[in-house]
Image: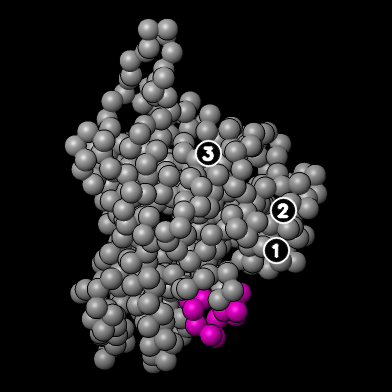
Amino acid sequence: MTASRPPHRWSKRTLTAQAMGKIDPTTKGVVPPIHIATTFIRDPDNQYSSGFVYGRPDNETIREAESVLAMWEEASSAMLFSSGMAAATAVFMALKPGDHVVAPTVMYWALRHWLLTDAKHWGLEIELADTSDLEALRAAVRPGVTKLVWVETPSNPLWTVTDLAAAAEIAHAAGAKLAVDSTAATPVFTRPLTLGADVVMHAATKALNGHSDVVAGALCFREQDAFQQRVALNRKMFGAILGPFEAYLLMRGMRTLDLRVRAASASALDLANRFANHPHVVAVLYPGLESHPQHALAARQMKGGFGHMLSIRTRGGETTAVATAAGIELWKRATSLGGVESLIEHRASIEGPGTPCPPDLLRLSAGIEDVDDLYADLDGALRRAHGG
């Protein structure tokens, strides 16, 4: 767990590209070494002046990646976990039996499933609500009873947007904390802590790493309070920390975070505009489109871009959607998002029964390939699926 450093005169993009300027003190290498030791020497007086005791709760390579993420999110501290689910569930497991939680109706499917099934074994009371509708959110929150409001914005896979400043006011007025899954927005475009959130979660497997070769999760905290300490204790006791080699790969990926995210988001906006007028597309779901019902909110809350994720609803229903995904050449049919390669997925069949995802929907994660190639490939697949 690493606390953020004081504000610096260099930009976040610059600091990230140079991994906060860390130089290996022994070799003077511009890439710090991977620290893999699991145990550390005690001082003659039986203390640990190095600050390291054992590999399960802490590691220098992990600290370095955490410092970059804390800087991006303007957080008091950041923690890396072995997966996004490990990070997310650590927040809920830091609550107490009987605590009431409000979460979105539309959100990352695996976490939604866990909340509606396993969370009850922790004694939590889970209530789902449309958090993008402030009146619905306000109605779901119970003053003095609700302890956590969890939101995801933009929400996966419908890409609705929740007003984070307003959600923070609602949560705090009720005595609850606001936690935000900001995986799709990335800290390049949205920093929820500056809008009033208490905790930010990232599935770091996605855009933060960007190369589809690391499974990781992250939490960033506005304050180092008792709740943050309970989460830290959970990570320590459950052994949910990220491995040092994975932290090294994550740090390598984050060095190009700003460039990758901006390039992919520009392609997503281009694709959204093109497919909005496509004869075989019923609707494009992307907050960057002026036709999106929450475009104005997204433009206010997402500074400089609208993210790399979008969905299209195909004319002809589920059969055509599945056939379109089967007919692509360049896009990759795979689960995940945020990598340099563009991914396509028929999401409803992945999520299964009970999903709020329409059966005609294809989820798209724009990568950094030539956008004309991406459009041509998907346009061709759509036309072939319709017999063209």
Above or below 144: residue 366: below
* Residue 15 falls left or right of residue 165: left
Left or right of 128? Residue 303 is: left
* Residue 15 image point, x, y percent: 38, 55
> Crowdedness of circle 2 by 10 Å Cα count: few (<14), some, many (20+)?
many
The residue that mark 2 highlights is 171
On the image, numbered disc 1 is attached to which residue?
Answer: 166
- Label whose residue precedes the other's in the sequence (2 or 1): 1
The mark found on residue 20 in the picture is none
Q: Position of residue 122 (x, y in %)?
A: 61, 34
The span from disc 1 to disc 3 (Cα, nearest Å) is: 25 Å
Q: Give the range drawn in magenta.
A: 285-297
Q: Which of 40 and 363 is in front in this view?
A: 40
Residue beneath disc 3: 90
Task: State the residue at coordinates (25%, 39%).
Answer: 24
Nearer the observer, 261 or 217: 261
Q: Residues within 10 Å of mark 3 (few under 14, many from 20)?
A: many
